[in-house]
Amino acid sequence: MRVSRYFMPVLKEDPAEAEIVSHRLMLRTGMIQQAAAGIYNWLPLGFRVLRKVERICREEMERAGAIEILMPTIQPASWWKESGRYEAYGKEMLRIRDRHDREMLYGPTNEENVVDIFRRHVKSYRQLPLNLFHIQWKFRDEIRPRFGVMRGREFLMKDAYSFDYDYEGARRSYETMFVAYLRTFRRMGLVAIPMLAESGPIGGSMSHEFQILAATGESVVYYDAAFEELDLTGEEVDVARLTSLYAAVEERHDPARCPVPPERLKKARGIEVGHIFYFGTKYSAPMGATVMGPDGREVPVEMGSYGIGVSRLVGAIIEAHHDEKGIVWPESVAPFRVALIGLRLDDADCRRMAEELYERMCAAGLEVLYDDTDERPGAKFATMELIGIPWQVVVGPRGARQGTVELRRRRTGESAELSPESVLARLTA
Ligand code: ATP
Ligand code: MG
């Protein structure tokens, strides 16, 4: 992508309305633009990151055996009356009437919806276990939308729903998601701490909140240092050990009863990015989602639900990965992998080399953002630092004559003078 042809409305000044760093940087780099309180446009740079976060969520869900569907954003109120949540949900729910005066709502979550799919098609324990997920926009009329995409009213969520015949199965499904969540956040360059949580309005009897560590997080968490070194690579992960590791939010942490020795106990700030629930038959019983067991008896199906705040994660990743110059994207979610900077494009050698390198990078399938404008070098550098692309390749007039370019790492500032061939080889390795 050429900067001269791209749509990247970078702001010159810090926006006054942003209270936290991710919100400030997302507005400043032109990733998002507010449409109304808690509702955002995703501009090209932001949308690329959102898609990458979404893709990692999808891949880890599929790896864990969940199957993707797409449920609508608008739901009939009747399902929620069946489950008993229509009245209970309160003002966070955006209620709508259509032209026939039928009660509808913009979904804040999809338990009822997925139960309706299930009850029409699944009748036997032999069809289980089943886990259906989707990645879809939600609306919650939050009393205080703030911090940009971190607490929006319209936000993108990955939500999965598991169905099992009995408690044992449901517990296995829960544990599978538990591990999938740790893997998902790890792939985004985040350390996630699962906390035993009180179940909110979704209700239930077992629940973990996943907090990622970031200095600017809203809550203070205590956790076993072992979380930072988890081995999640193999197929067989020791779930019993994982779920037994100590972690607690400050309000619940009791130093006198904490089982972790002081040298292994860590304190940090966290941001909730995911929440998993086991809630048994809370929805299946009132909505009549039953399955026939091996003994020929019909029982309500055992369920769990598993949410990840996909759009919140974009902000949360920035909270965990930035410095005084701007964002420092982890490679897996960076909007582009390489920033190619042509320093002086009025110099014929410099332009030739930059253009040629750009063509070769594109041909090699690298995601490259090429600054081909006639901005001052200082301004070009500042913008690339701000938007935080992991690798910078700088082509200057002197290097162009010697046949070298500079390869720089955004995170560390390390740099090396290399031939264009070695740069290509390194970046495509
Ligand atoms: P919170 O405690 O932050 O209000 P919640 O418990 O209401 O969240 P869940 O219903 O568990 O949230 O939703 C699953 C995930 O969706 C959350 O872990 C969070 O990452 C994300 N999420 C929830 N509310 C919002 C919001 N208003 N804006 C952005 N993401 C959100
Ligand atoms: Mg929560």
Image (cartoon, rainbow, N blue to C red):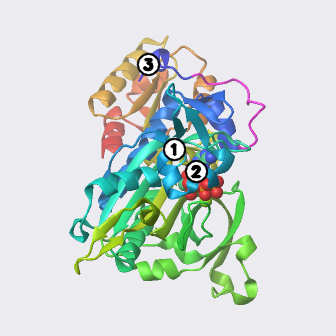
Please state the quadrant of the image where ligand 2 appears. Answer: bottom right
Horizontal side of 398 relative to 252 (left or right) equals left
Looking at the image, is mark 2 or mark 3 nearer the viewer? 2
The residue depicted at 32 percent of the width and 28 percent of the height is 362
Span shown in magenta? 9-20
Please tell me how crowded label 1 is: few (under 14), some (14-19), or many (20+) other residues with Cα within 10 Å. many
Q: Is residue 378 magenta?
A: no
Residue holding disc 3: 350
For residue 284, what is the image quadrant?
Answer: bottom left
Q: Which mark is residue 86?
A: 2
Give whichever of 144, 88 is nearer the camera: 88
Give whichever of 9, 352 is nearer the camera: 9
Query: Along the polypeptide, which appears first: circle 3 or circle 1?
Result: 1
Identity of the amino acid at label 3? Cys
Residues at marks 2 and 3, CA–CA distance in whole angstroms: 64 Å
Please tell me how crowded label 3 is: few (under 14), some (14-19), or many (20+) other residues with Cα within 10 Å. many
Identity of the amino acid at label 2? Tyr
Residues at marks 3 and 1, CA–CA distance in whole angstroms: 63 Å
Query: Along the polypeptide, which appears first: circle 2 or circle 3?
Result: 2
Q: Is residue 15 magenta?
A: yes
Residue holding disc 1: 77
In the image, residue 268 above or below residue 3:
below
